[in-house]
Amino acid sequence: MSAIPDTEAVDFRQIRRKDWTIIGLIGSAHSASHFFQLVFPTLYLSLAHEFGYDFVKLGLLASIFFLVSCLGQASSGFVVDRIGPAPVLRFGLASFVVSGVLIGSANGYAMLVLAAVIGGMGNSVFHPVDYSIMNHRVSPARLGHAFSTHGLTGNLGWALTPVFMATIIHLSNWRVAAFSAAGLVAFVLVLTWLGRSLLAGTNQQAVAASAAPGASSGSQVDLSRQSVGQTLATLLVQPALWGAFLFFMFTSVALSAVQNYTIPMLGDIYAIDKVLAGGTLSAYMIAAAVGMLAGGFLVGTTPNTERTVFVSLLLAGALLAVLALGTVPPVVAMGLVALAGFFSGVAAPSRDMLIRRVTPKGATGTVYGLVYSGMDVGSSLAPVGFGLMLDAGLGRGPWFGAATAFAIAAVLAVWVARWAGRSVAAVSTARA
């Protein structure tokens, strides 16, 4: 009589262990992508000293990196859906390794530009790859934790780069630091190769759970079997997809305002010195990571994840608006910045679960690639726009702008949820 429960317990432990191994592998890869995004900026001073480049040339390297990434992110999703995410993941990591080696052996600007292009190509694949693997390979019970861990590891990757690179530059030189960055990513590449059997294929339980309400997985058209043109024609007429794209664009606008201009605004409005202001910005990022962990537990408490996104982003926006008013003491202002980061982080896992509801069968990589490209659009537009505000004397503009962007994103989350069921149902019957 006890054999069945014992067998079920063993199966549960095996599934849980497999899920967390997959989550760990994807988290390591995502951390590596964020780590490599900051390799060029951490080498600016060293490259300027070595080659005499000005900051326009140095900044252009990062711009090339992200421009290539932006162009590649939307298109890489189609590749993921057709050949599978595991080989594309290894391509992305291998591109970082090649880029790091090129940086370390560079003899001039042309090699650095080539390294930026190859690194940008590698960076473009991670969101379509990561979310495709998590949605198809992680059990539904742990999917929220997978999303929160994914966001957390990305933040940790950003945090690691300056410390890692600065330490090796201090102990040796910038070329060794670049080679070491390539070596670190190569180690992650080896891990994904060793775990390739876990990252390939499909978890049927996860796929069944992702079917649209009221529709079986068998009734859905598998868009991975359609041509790229047919897939685009089907997806781009879906309002939920465009809503999700705009959602990511506006949340990216808000984050860009906070990341780029919180330090000068804390100084101008609250007379907080640069060291404390920098620590406050770090507190925002750390609090956001903690919020992501908390948000992973909230995902499983309600099927209406848009409500969590709506409330969390409205609270984050409200806190930034209060900061912009300049009516609180400096110490309180620093605390409000961190609290705003926490609420923005809480929304992240529920946000990713919401996008999952927009995704029809066979288009996971494509959808995540398309909607996440909205982040690149927001990141490219916001710094210039908010910089113009500051130059025009609107010293509180970026915080008000971030609050407005969070509020718009909150409304878009509800709008996307409203259209999600209709969009997936429409795709399910299209071309049937």
Image (cartoon, rainbow, N blue to C red):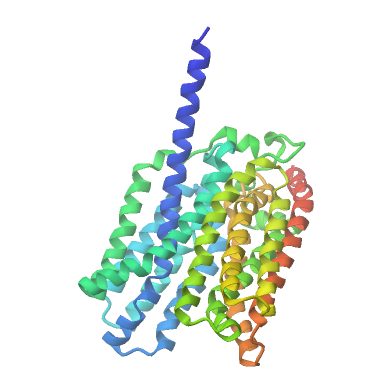
Write down the quadrant of residue 58 in the picture.
Answer: bottom left
Q: Nearer the viewer, residue 223 or 168?
A: 168
* Relative to 416, 80 lies left or right: left
* Above/below status of 73 relative to 253: above
Determine which quarter of the picture holds residue 156: bottom left
Q: Residue 1 in the image: x percent, y percent?
A: 53, 7
The residue shown at (61%, 65%) is 340
Among all residues in the image, which is located at the extreme left?
172
Residue 25 image point, x, y percent:
42, 47
Image quarter of residue 302: top right
Can residue 122 be seen here? no
Q: Quadrant of the C terminus?
A: top right
Q: Is residue 43 left or right of residue 37?
A: left
Q: Is residue 2 left or right of residue 97?
A: right
Q: Residue at 45% of width from left, 82% of height from top? A: 60
Q: Where residue 190 sits in the image (x, y, percent)?
A: 32, 49
Q: Is residue 5 above or below residue 413?
A: above
Residue at image point 40% right, 53% down: 90
Report x, y in % for residue 319.
Answer: 67, 68
Q: Nearer the viewer, residue 127 or 399?
A: 399
What residue is rendered at 55% in x and 60% in y? 288
Number of marks drawn: 0
Judged from this view, the residue extending furthest toward the bottom is 392
Residue 3 visible somewhere in the drawing: yes
Looking at the picture, tell me which residue is in the foreground, 116 or 40. 40
Residue 31 vs residue 336, the one in the foreground: 336
